[in-house]
């Protein structure tokens, strides 16, 4: 039986690099499913993967993690197509409207915190969030809640007797407890919705382990390091892509001091790929697995304890369950009113 691997946000960056790496190690024994919001970009990614691995099984799935109805129909489709799901990579993520604080950056360069600043981006980035058509904060909906709903919908194939499945979150070193507030889990009020959403994924992963390990479902969190992708290019919009490339020698230099500058999607996918090869029972639920690249360009994975606790993770889990039931109620009402309006039209 081939293992089924589903990757969200698989059409570019770290997600696509992971798919490439998975197929490079095992073309025959895998059924890869690229879950993407844009089917043209998904098709292009599939073609690229099939060019280097012509015999691979690569399927596409339309999934917009920021949309409740899209998540629910995508999950239905997965359950129809597959009777097992061995790995679910929760990788799709956004950091829209980032604001880079040049002053704080320059101050950071001449401070003791320079390494932390380069490793985590702490203190130099803020974002402006928006609201989705489901009335959720967009970053929260895309990076965490859509994925939570997906897991809940896929429970029947993720938790099967006698089998284990793995959930693997692409989190970030930018996840900070200080950006997260249990009273405002969507981060409606602050200026760091990205950091808050990533910290929430760290907490949620811990809670999922508490609730699902007995049923054979395990959750882990990774940090890809600082990788040049569409997401990071958006941070300095005045910088065209070629200028980022010109900065590469500077980044290689910085890498000597902080091995978190993985820089390429291939390197950033190291921990995602490493987790694929591990026994889930051997993993630490309180660790974040970091993709790291040494000054000489060698990739490796290192676990580091997360700043999370069981009590907060449980509290977040309860809030997400509550939001889930509200959202389902809202969806039912929306469907009822669309049915009624189409009835009147006919
Ligand atoms: N690059 C970095 O330095 C770091 C990245 N990360 C995380 O890594 C993950 C991958 O990002 P990265 O590869 O860097 O950036 P990319 O922008 O290249 O990849 C993000 C992927 O997520 C997809 N996506 C975005 N929104 C949605 C949505 N609503 N529904 C479905 N898919 C969606 C994008 O699709 P589309 O092409 O259609 O936009 C894209 O395929 C993210 O979770 C990010 O937060 C974490 C730490 C550092
Ligand atoms: C010479 C200068 C133009 C260099 C600027 C560097 C910064 C733009 C980057 C240094 C560390 C980076 C970083 C991120 C974004 C870009 C930096 C701030 C992230 C916050 C991107 C998203 C993440 O999830 C974590 C990254 C940590 C490091």
Image: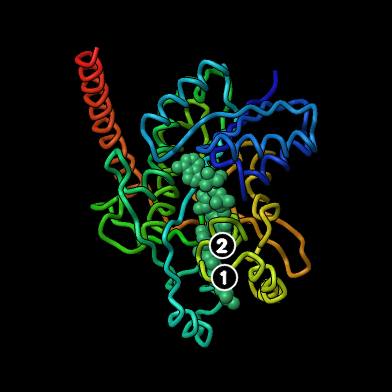
Give the residue at mark 1: 239
Q: Which residue is mark 2?
A: 233
Note whether residue 221 is visible: no
User: From the viewer's perspective, is 219 left or right of 268?
Assistant: left
Mark 1 or mark 2, which has the lower sequence index?
Answer: 2
Mark-to-mark CA distance, 1 and 2: 8 Å
| Quadrant position of residue 180 | bottom left
Image vertical order of residue 97 relative to residue 55, above or below: below
Q: Could you say which is closer to the camera, residue 36 or residue 262? A: 36
**Residue 81: which disc?**
none
Residue at x 78% of width, y 68% of height: 296
Q: Position of residue 157 (x, y in %)?
A: 51, 21
Residue at image point 73% right, 39% down? 48
In the rendered image, the vertical position of residue 330 relative to residue 77, given as above or below: below
- Residue closest to the far front: 346
In contact (CB < 8 Å): disc 1 and disc 2 = yes
């Amino acid at each position: 039986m081939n293992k089924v691997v589903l990757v969200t946000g698989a059409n570019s960056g770290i997600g696509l690099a992971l798919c490439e790496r998975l197929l490079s190690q095992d073309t025959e024994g895998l059924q890869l499913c690229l879950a993407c919001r844009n089917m043209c970009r998904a098709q292009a990614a599939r073609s690229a993967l099939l060019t280097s691995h012509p015999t691979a099984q690569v399927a596409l799935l339309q999934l917009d993690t920021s949309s409740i109805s899209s998540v629910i129909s995508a999950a239905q489709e997965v359950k129809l197509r597959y009777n097992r799901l061995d790995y679910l990579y929760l990788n799709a993520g956004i950091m829209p409207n980032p604001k880079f604080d040049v002053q704080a950056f320059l101050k950071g360069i001449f401070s003791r915190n320079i390494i932390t600043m380069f490793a985590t981006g702490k203190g130099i980035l803020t974002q402006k969030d928006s609201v989705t058509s489901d009335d959720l904060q967009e970053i929260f909906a895309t990076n965490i809640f859509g994925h939570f709903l997906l897991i809940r919908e896929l429970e029947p194939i993720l938790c099967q007797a006698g089998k284990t499945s793995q959930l693997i979150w692409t989190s970030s070193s930018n996840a900070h407890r200080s950006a997260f507030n249990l009273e405002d889990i969507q981060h409606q009020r602050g200026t760091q919705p990205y950091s808050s959403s990533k910290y929430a994924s760290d907490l949620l992963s811990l809670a999922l382990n508490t609730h699902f390990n007995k049923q054979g479902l395990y959750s882990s969190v990774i940090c890809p390091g600082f990788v040049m992708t569409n997401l990071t290019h958006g941070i300095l919009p005045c910088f065209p892509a070629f200028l980022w490339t010109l900065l590469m020698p500077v980044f290689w230099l910085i890498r000597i001091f902080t091995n978190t500058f993985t820089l390429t999607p291939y390197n950033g996918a190291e921990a995602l790929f490493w987790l694929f090869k591990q026994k889930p029972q051997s993993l630490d639920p309180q660790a974040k697995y970091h993709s790291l690249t040494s000054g000489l360009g060698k990739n490796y994975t290192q676990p580091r304890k997360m700043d999370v606790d069981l009590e907060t993770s449980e509290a977040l889990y309860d809030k997400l369950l509550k939001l889930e039931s509200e959202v389902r109620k809202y969806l039912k009402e929306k469907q009822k009113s669309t049915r009624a309006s189409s009835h009147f039209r006919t």
